[in-house]
Image (cartoon, rainbow, N blue to C red):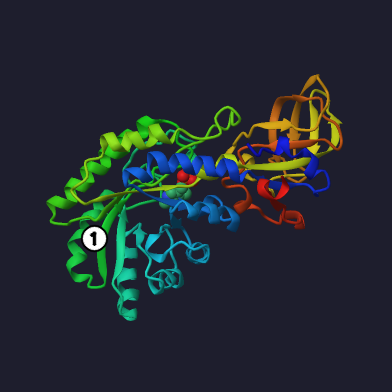
Amino acid sequence: MADITSLLGSIQNIPTPFYFYDLELLGKSLDEVKKHGLTKGYKVHYAMKANANPRILEVIRQYHLGADAVSANEVKAALAAGFPKEEIVFAGVGKSDEEIIVGLSNDIFCFNCESAQEVEVINELAGKMGKKAKIALRINPNVDAKTHHYITTGMKENKFGLPPKEIDQVIDKLPQLANIQLTGIHFHIGSQVTSLESYTQLAQRANDFNVYFRSKGIELQHVNVGGGLGIDYVEPKTNPVPDFKSYFEVFEKQMKLAPGQELHFELGRAIVGQCGSLISKVLYNKEGETIKFLIIDAGMTELIRPALYQAEHFIENITSQSQAFETYDVVGPICESSDAFRRGIELKQSKRGDLLAIRSAGAYGEVMMSRYNLRDNAKTYFDVDLG
Ligand SMILES: *Cc1c(COP(=O)(O)O)cnc(C)c1O
């Protein structure tokens, strides 16, 4: 495997912090998606928001995944990366008129709609353009994803998806919406979901809704069960590839599709999460009264997940020659107390100049980079270029 630890000779002169991507590992994840999902005839749309780096998109497209966009710019980035327009879905709770027009003018596969009002707006805009918009209704299934509440999306108190009472409202209105073609139903219960039980519940709810639409005389071309499959942040080196087999098997076993009906997925984190590491240099050792701090040159500006979701990433010192271990708080340089990666973790004894690898940073890392404190954006490097 082309891990950063096998490339130490080639990275000595690269300015830190930087993102390192192991494209070989990305390929291994995609091999599993193909083996356990695509070969069953399932359509998998890659959730672009997890990582939209063009080199990453290029690899993903080679596996013939579609794209799941949540903004017009993501639709454009998907097209630029070679994703065919008929394999792009466009989701999002607040699509602006301008963004909807981008989707319409590019004749994308479908809009995943999140309210009755949005459906009417799309109908109107499509009418003006002389188009028929394909839509799927995003339904809030009220399934608990058992993940952090900031990344739970499928409970009735979340802002996402049509509340059940609006479903009938849309169905009743459909005959008047001349520029809308309802092609599917869509669900997404949240992110970093590790309980397969939640997916069993989702599949059962999806079946119920599928039957309901049929009872109303609507033939759905596809059912989209979203994404959210989690990765192992605790032991990324033991489990670099998520258990796609079990994940897809849940749906294979549970879903009751009508003849000819397609099953779609939208995976982001599970595909790209483990292939990225944030590499950072130790700037200072600071001894507080009770705590030993390692102040490193990466911060929440490069990887905001710890500050935003209390996420914990596995960290290792990849250059220390020491055999001794110490307990450290690993913190960034930004002027915010939440700018801390981990508290109280064991690392090889670390000193100024050592390199730390912050693992599992391939998803929701680089894409959320900011220039807060007017810091420069970290650059990205790939195993295939460093070898
Ligand atoms: C974010 C998102 C996804 C992907 O979530 P992951 O946890 O990265 O798999 C899929 N579908 C929708 C609608 C999303 O918003």
Q: Which residue is mark 1?
A: 170
Q: Quadrant of the C terminus?
A: top right
The crowding category of the residue bearing disc 1, from other C-alpha atoms within 10 Å (few below 14, some 14 to 19, many at least 20), is some
Residue sitting at x 34%, y 69%: 122
- Closer to the camera, 77 or 154? 77
Task: Where is residue 135? Give x, y as percent.
Answer: 31, 62
Task: Where is residue 56? Give x, y as percent.
Answer: 57, 52
- Closer to the camera, 4 or 175? 4
Residue 253 drawn above or below residue 333: above
Task: Where is residue 230? Give x, y as percent.
Answer: 48, 36
Q: Quadrant of the N terminus?
A: top right
Residue sitting at x 72%, y 52%: 378
Query: Where, by quadrant of the figure, is residue 7 drawn?
Result: top right
Query: At numbered mark 1, what does the secondary structure look like: helix, strand or loop?
Result: helix
Task: Where is residue 324? Give x, y as percent.
Answer: 81, 19
Q: Quick one: which residue is furthest to the front in this view? A: 387
**Residue 314 placement, left or right of 290:** left
- Closer to the camera, 160 or 71? 71
Query: Where, by quadrant of the figure, is residue 152 drawn?
Result: top left
Can residue 51 be seen here? The reply is yes
Can residue 151 be seen here? The reply is no
**Residue 283 placement, left or right of 2:** right
Looking at the rendered structure, the kind of residue marked 1 is Val
- From the Cβ of disc 1, is ligand 1 less than 8 Å away? no
Q: How many marks?
A: 1
